């Protein structure tokens, strides 16, 4: 019974991780689109951020482009790392000056996105990402997956 459950989890893992990557990236891209183009309610209640304004417009650009790259899984690790860093910057420069904890300073979205993108940067795009279609990438990933599969089977057997 436990073996069947483990097999089901092994099959579901890449699908769940892909769904996580796509949802986080899409939500982040929507924040960028809202700030840059005024869609989805716009920035701060309906407007847009003036082009080139520091740091808001640049953050919105990172959100839109970085989120889009993460959604499709192209340059996933570096895009996710940049997105994570931008949210850490947002938290420490915008939110933390009001209070220490995210619940007190309205910094929860920044913290959640920061840690979610850091996890995506560590995990990578997975099997359902455009990164896998790049020359030389799929062979390297397949070798890594084979090694990881052997390691997990050895751990399960031991």
Image: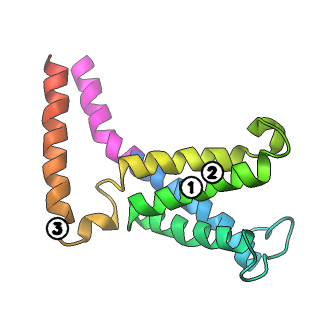
* Residue range of the region highlighted in magenta in the rendering: 1-16
Q: Nearer the viewer, residue 58 or 66?
A: 58
Q: Is residue 59 magenta?
A: no
Asked whether the viewer can see residue 63, the reply is yes
Residue 119 spot, x, y in % from top left = 46, 45
- Quadrant location, the C terminus: top left
As drawn, the label of residue 122 is none
Q: Nearer the viewer, residue 19 or 53?
A: 53
Instruction: Please report whichever mark, 1 or 3, sits nearer to the chain's N-terminal start.
Output: 1
Residue 35 spot, x, y in % from top left = 74, 71
Q: Name the magenta segment's main secondary structure.
A: helix
Name the residue carrying label 1. 85
Vertical arrangement, residue 109 with respect to residue 62, above or below: above
Q: Compute the Cα span from label 2 to label 1.
A: 5 Å
Which residue corresponds to the image point at 82% horizontal and 43% vertical from the top-left?
Answer: 105
**Taking 47 as reference, is 36 left or right?**
left
Residue 149 spot, x, y in % from top left = 17, 38
Q: Is residue 11 magenta?
A: yes
Which residue corresponds to the image point at 61% horizontal and 59% vertical from the top-left?
Answer: 86
Vertical arrangement, residue 91 with respect to residue 139, above or below: above
- Quadrant location, the N terminus: top left
How many residues crowd mark 1 within 10 Å: few (<14), some (14–19), many (20+)? some
Query: Is label 1 or label 3 in front?
Result: 1
Name the residue carrying label 3. 136
Residue 143 spot, x, y in % from top left = 13, 51
Name the residue carrying label 2. 88
Q: Nearer the viewer, residue 75 or 46?
A: 75
């Amino acid at each position: 019974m436990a073996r069947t459950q483990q097999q089901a989890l092994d099959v579901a893992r890449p699908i769940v991780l892909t769904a996580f990557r796509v949802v986080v990236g899409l939500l982040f891209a929507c924040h960028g689109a809202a700030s840059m183009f005024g869609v989805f309610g716009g920035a701060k209640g309906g407007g847009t951020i003036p082009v080139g304004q520091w740091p808001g417009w640049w953050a919105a650009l990172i959100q839109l482009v970085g989120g889009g790259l993460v959604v499709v899984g192209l340059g996933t690790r570096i895009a996710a790392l940049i997105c994570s860093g931008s949210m850490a910057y947002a938290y420490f420069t915008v939110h933390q000056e009001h209070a220490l904890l995210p619940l007190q300073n309205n910094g929860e979205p920044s913290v959640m996105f920061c840690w979610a993108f850091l996890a995506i940067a560590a995990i990578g795009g997975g099997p359902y990402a455009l990164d896998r279609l790049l020359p030389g990438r799929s062979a390297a990933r397949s070798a890594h997956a084979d090694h990881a599969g052997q390691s997990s089977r050895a751990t399960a057997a031991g």
